Image (cartoon, rainbow, N blue to C red):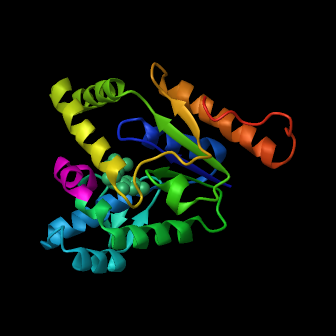
Amino acid sequence: MIVTIDGPAGAGKSSVAKRLAKQLGFDFLDTGAMYRCVTLACLRRGISLDQVESVAELARDLKINLGPHCVELDGENVTEAIRTPKVTKSIQAIADNVQVRSILVNAQRNWGQGKDAVTEGRDQGTVAFPMAECKIFLTAGPEERARRRVAQLLELGVDVSFEEVLELQNQRDSQDTQRPEGGLRPAVDSIMVCTDGMSEDEVLDKLVQIVDQRRSVLLGLNRNEPLSNSQ
Ligand code: C5P
């Protein structure tokens, strides 16, 4: 069974998707980390981000290993290095590169073969796994997402203003949504979950409930209870 979780930056996908996979005993794939690895490799090797062919060639050769606790790029632990603001700011050109998307989507599909897995990103339900058995679109209002991000950064000792975070987040949302290939949008058969006002534990409970319900439908146990696509 493949469970896809897509949604905008700051909706809390990463941590809840990881916890969901753990609870279900499924493998977990953070596809944003793959785009981040390609971006980091370009920055380190001085490859211009808009050199579509050179970037794609590099993406093809990289050895990205996404373990449960760390991300490795060509054998080096880059778990923290891929999350710096420099990487986040530079990622859009890589995510817009259609050749890179195709290479990474193929790698995601190969990884998913024969697995029970939770995969998280922007295009998992629409492009990478259109036949996934359970698709979730996790979202929250822009202000709520920005508030959560400010709180996270404060915990890490980074002092940023709410307005600054909101503005950067709006920019990223609009770039992610407007991307013609692999853009952020809910799959028609996805279940929307708006996490406004919910704690992470409550979101996790909701997702477990959705997956269980979906499994029952797939097993034919619940034929008279079709899933609503708004939760
Ligand atoms: O999820 P995360 O914030 O790590 O993703 C970083 C960026 O990678 C996103 O803003 C998006 O531009 C890109 N991305 C993507 N497709 C995915 C996952 C991430 O384009 N499946």
Q: Is residue 57 above or below residue 142?
A: below
- Is residue 212 in view? yes
Asked whether, in this view, residue 176 is left or right of residue 109, the answer is: left
* Quarter assignment of residue 44: bottom left
Q: Residue at x 42, y 36 (%)?
A: 12
Q: Residue at x 27, y 55 (%)?
A: 82
Q: Position of residue 6 (x, y in %)?
A: 48, 46
- Is residue 32 in view? no
Figure quadrant of the C terminus: top right
Magenta stretch, residue numbers:
82-92
Q: Residue at x 48, y 27 (%)?
A: 195
Prevailing SS of the magenta stretch = helix
Q: Is residue 43 above or below residue 55?
A: above
* Quarter assignment of residue 31: bottom left
Asked whether, in this view, residue 43 is left or right of residue 27, the answer is: left
Q: Position of residue 69 (x, y in %)?
A: 43, 52
Q: Residue at x 27, y 63 (%)?
A: 94
The foreground one among 157 and 53 is: 53
Q: Indicate yes or no whether the magenta region holds residue 90.
A: yes
Number of marks in the rendered image: 0
Q: Indicate yes or no whether the magenta region holds residue 20.
A: no
Q: Position of residue 58 (x, y in %)?
A: 28, 77
Q: Position of residue 1 (x, y in %)?
A: 68, 55
Asked whether, in this view, residue 205 is left or right of residue 105, the answer is: right
The foreground one among 109 and 15 is: 109
